[in-house]
Image: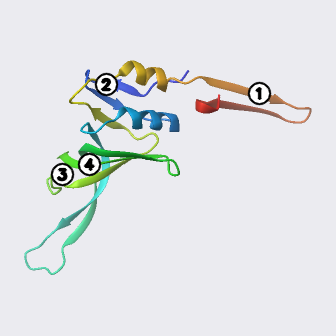
Amino acid sequence: MRKVKVKRLSKNSAEIIPETVDDMLLLRLSISKDDLVSAKTIRTVKFEKNYSRHAEKEKKTIILTVRVSEITFDGTFEKLKISGFIEATSDEHVQKGTRHALEIGLYTKFLLIKEKNQIDFKSLEKNLILDELILVAIDSLVAGIGKIRGSQV
């Protein structure tokens, strides 16, 4: 069995790292509207100068906290897209209350905070623990070893 990447911070918050597509599908069902999700993201920030025609733009990696209004899963790119309004930011140039979409990929750490109800850690941990299978194939000329885990087992 693999180590679960759910770190319990309180009864309403957890730090989560999805490792498989199955984890992403489970998280899509676990995250609901009005939850808070915090993650690193890249945002274009405009700097306006007093005597300049054009505003300077700079891409920055910042931490945003978004109040979830919509969550979708893109199976092609294996990403969760969490859309909502910005509640908190690590950069003073980013305005609160504007819309943003966080993209959570595989092995991307994020913080989930549920204000209205508690996180169901038992179902998360039960569903995130997956069996692994070691497969050994031996032929007269070649031998191979493989590890299968997740929904393929």
Task: Determine the residue positioned at 44% across, 35% down.
Answer: 18
| Kind of residue sitting beneath label 1 | Val
- Residue receiving disc 3: 91
Mark 2 surroundings: few (<14), some (14-19) or many (≥20) residues within 10 A: many
Q: Earlier in the sequence, mark 1 or mark 2?
A: 2
- The CA distance from mark 3 to mark 4 is 18 Å
- Is disc 1 placed on a helix, strand or loop? strand
Q: Is residue 89 visible?
A: no
| Kind of residue sitting beneath label 4 | Gly
Q: Are marks 3 and 1 in contact (CB under 8 Å)?
A: no
Q: Are marks 2 and 3 in contact (CB under 8 Å)?
A: no
Task: Give x and y (percent) for residue 69.
Answer: 27, 45
- The CA distance from mark 1 to mark 2 is 39 Å
Q: Is residue 29 left or right of residue 140?
A: left
Q: Is residue 78 left or right of residue 51?
A: right
Q: Are marks 4 and 1 in contact (CB under 8 Å)?
A: no
Q: Is residue 95 left or right of residue 79?
A: left
- Residue receiving disc 4: 84
- Is disc 2 placed on a helix, strand or loop? loop
Q: Nearer the viewer, mark 4 or mark 1?
A: 4
Image vertical order of residue 125 relative to residue 78, above or below: above
Q: Which mark is residue 136?
A: 1
Residue 47 figure quarter? bottom left
